[in-house]
Image (spheres, grey):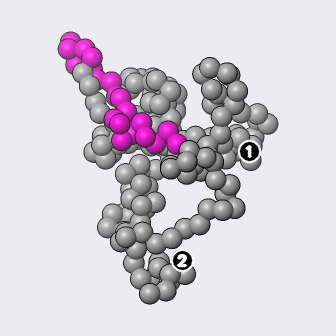
């Protein structure tokens, strides 16, 4: 069954999902962020059928999240690397990992990977940060407001009156 396209929706979340594609693509982004780059490595890590893998890699390349680079001429071989746009999804992957760890999504009772400070070794977590002050902002203080291109319905849902 083919998923409905989110193209044309005026929503950044829908646009991001359209760019990424599906859950297989998220696993590919995870593996590429962990340093895997060759087709065989990606296939072995995910267990993805080869047709699915090829399709997802082409989609991610078309979305500008990865690029394919030649590494061998005879026979021709390519590897895959995250673009700056793809690498910037590290926050999304970290948020998914933190959620999965908190709710034991792997069913193993422990995390398989941890994000730590490279100098101190202390665990790190994602946080909402005020870009002017650099200070963490508690989730309870966070509010949504309509952006410059918000549709009238969204403006109403978020309580804006004009």
Per the image, the residue denoted by label 1 is: 102
- For the C terminus, the image quarter is bottom left
Which residue is depicted at the point 56% across and 44% down? 134
Which residue is depicted at the point 64% across and 27% down? 116
Picture quadrant of residue 2: bottom left
Q: Which residues are magenta?
A: 71-91
**Of 22 and 119, the residue lying toward us:** 119
Mark whose residue sits in front, 1 or 2: 2
* Residue at disc 2, secondary structure: loop
Q: Tell me how many marks there are.
A: 2
Q: Residue 32 placed where, x, y %? A: 44, 30
**Of 118 and 39, the residue lying toward us:** 118
- For the N terminus, the image quarter is bottom left
Q: Please indicate whether residue 107 sits to the left or right of residue 28 in the image.
A: right
Picture quadrant of residue 78: top left
Which residue is depicted at the point 69% across and 31% down? 123
**Of 23 and 54, the residue lying toward us:** 23
Q: Residue furthest front?
A: 133
Per the image, the residue denoted by label 2 is: 158
Let me know if residue 42 is in the magenta part. no
Let me know if residue 83 is in the magenta part. yes
Q: Please indicate whether residue 70 sits to the left or right of residue 99 in the image.
A: left
Q: Please indicate whether residue 6 sits to the left or right of residue 64 in the image.
A: right
Which residue is depicted at the point 50% across and 39% down? 90
The CA distance from mark 1 to mark 2 is 29 Å
Q: Residues within 10 Å of mark 2 (few under 14, many from 20)?
A: few
Check the image and report above or below for 61 versus 151. Answer: above
Which labelled disc corresponds to residue 25? none
The answer to whether residue 76 is seen in the rendering is yes
Q: Residue 149 placed where, x, y %? A: 35, 71
């Amino acid at each position: 069954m083919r998923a409905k396209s989110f193209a044309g929706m005026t929503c950044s979340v829908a646009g991001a999902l359209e760019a990424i594609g599906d859950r297989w693509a998220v696993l590919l982004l995870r593996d590429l962020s962990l340093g895997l780059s060759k087709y065989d490595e990606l296939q072995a890590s995910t267990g993805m059928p080869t047709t699915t893998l090829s399709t997802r890699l082409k989609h991610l390349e078309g979305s500008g999240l990865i690029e394919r680079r030649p590494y061998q001429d005879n026979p021709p071989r390519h590897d895959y690397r995250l673009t700056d746009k793809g690498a910037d999804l590290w926050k999304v992957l970290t948020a998914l990992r933190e959620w999965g760890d908190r709710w034991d999504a792997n069913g193993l009772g422990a995390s398989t990977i941890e994000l730590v400070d490279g100098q101190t070794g202390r665990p790190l977590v994602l946080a909402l940060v005020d870009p002017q002050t650099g200070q963490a902002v508690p989730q309870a203080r966070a509010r949504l407001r309509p952006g410059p291109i918000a549709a009238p319905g969204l403006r109403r849902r978020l309580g804006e009156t004009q």
